[in-house]
Amino acid sequence: MFAIVDEKIDVGALIEGARRPDCGAVSTFVGTTRVDEAGDNSVEYLEYEAYRPMADRKLEEIGAEIEERWDVGHVAIVHRVGRVDPGEASVAIVVASPRRGPAFEASRYAIERIKEIVPIWKREVWSDGYVWVGSQVGTRPG
């Protein structure tokens, strides 16, 4: 499963969907919103936007790259768009493999590739303003 979603990510369902009798390892990476602080201000939530037709294709491309590089039985990548509050998942990557090494390596590879090639933009909403994270120009004071 490779998807951009508007709703909360059901990580448990992704893990259940990855279980295979021929795979002894299911590696899961979940990226969540953390409360960052600077002075008296803090991150209140994140907002993600995506160019969805291309983002969907790029997630599938990452899955194909993983299947070419590692012995895996299953790969799922789900990224959320819209508002994501502290503690909530913004991205989940689940990889099943016969062995743990490839599962860990493929999961790490997936998150790095998402940041490199998938058109998803993140806006940090702080108590005193907001800033786009990435190549966009920040608008947060200070």
Image (cartoon, helix red, strand yellow):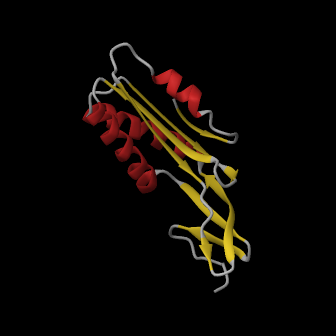
* Residue 74 position (above or below residue 36): above
Quarter holding the C terminus is: bottom right
* Residue 113 position (above or below residue 68): below
**Percent from the top left, x then y, of residue 18?**
46, 23
Residue most toward the bottom?
142
**Percent from the top left, x then y, of residue 79?**
57, 44
Residue at the spot 66% in from the left edge and 59% down from the top edge: 46
Residue at the spot 58% in from the left edge and 59% down from the top edge: 121
* Residue 115 position (above or below residue 126): above
Which of the 4 image quadrants contains residue 95? Answer: top left
Residue most toward the top?
21
* Residue 13 position (above or below residue 4): above
Which of the 4 image quadrants contains residue 23? Answer: top left
Q: How many marks?
A: 0
**Percent from the top left, x then y, of residue 14?**
54, 28
Q: Is residue 14 left or right of residue 82?
A: left
